[in-house]
Amino acid sequence: VQLVESGGGLVQAGGSLTLSCVASGNIYKVNTMRWYHQAPGKQREVVAGLTTGGTVHYTDFVKGRFTISRDDAKNTVYLQMNSLKPEDTGVYYCNTDIQGSPNYEEDYWGQGTQVTVSS
């Protein structure tokens, strides 16, 4: 299984970006999908998660600004980021729980995509 992120880049404060993460490979079912943020010199932290049932979680810092969504037909998760702040700068990683068979699940990480917000 491979996760490939895209959509990062350089944007001015107040701007928007949409990140995408596509899962491919031996996939029986994609379960919870998440986005993590790692700021320079800091630990990786979850910013949003979305279950197959539609339950959504956001960290307080991004509530009202970021929206996570998924397209199960495409095994893809998105992160719409609005009103970006310089503090949102960092590498964004996709993390997904994937079943390769009915009785086996493993979580996978993408390679990350860089987001830089200038002030």
Image: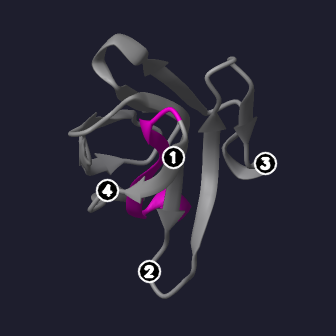
Q: Residues within 10 Å of mark 3 (few under 14, many from 20)?
A: few
* Residue 16: x %, y % from top left: 39, 33
What's the mark number on residue 40? 2
Q: Residues within 10 Å of mark 2 (few under 14, many from 20)?
A: few
Secondary-structure class at tag 2: loop
Task: Give, as a single range, the part of the protein colored magenta.
Answer: 85-102
Q: Residues within 10 Å of mark 1 (few under 14, many from 20)?
A: few
* Residue 29: x %, y % from top left: 45, 28
Please say whether residue 48 is visible from this viewpoint: yes
* Residue type for callout 4: Gly
* Residue type for callout 3: Asp
In primary-sequence order, the first of circles 4 and 3 is 3
Q: CA distance from mark 4 to mark 1?
A: 20 Å
Quadrant that contains the C terminus: bottom left
* Residue 36: x %, y % from top left: 52, 57
* Residue type for callout 1: Tyr
Residue beneath label 4, please? Answer: 110
Q: Residue at x 44, y 47 (%)?
A: 13
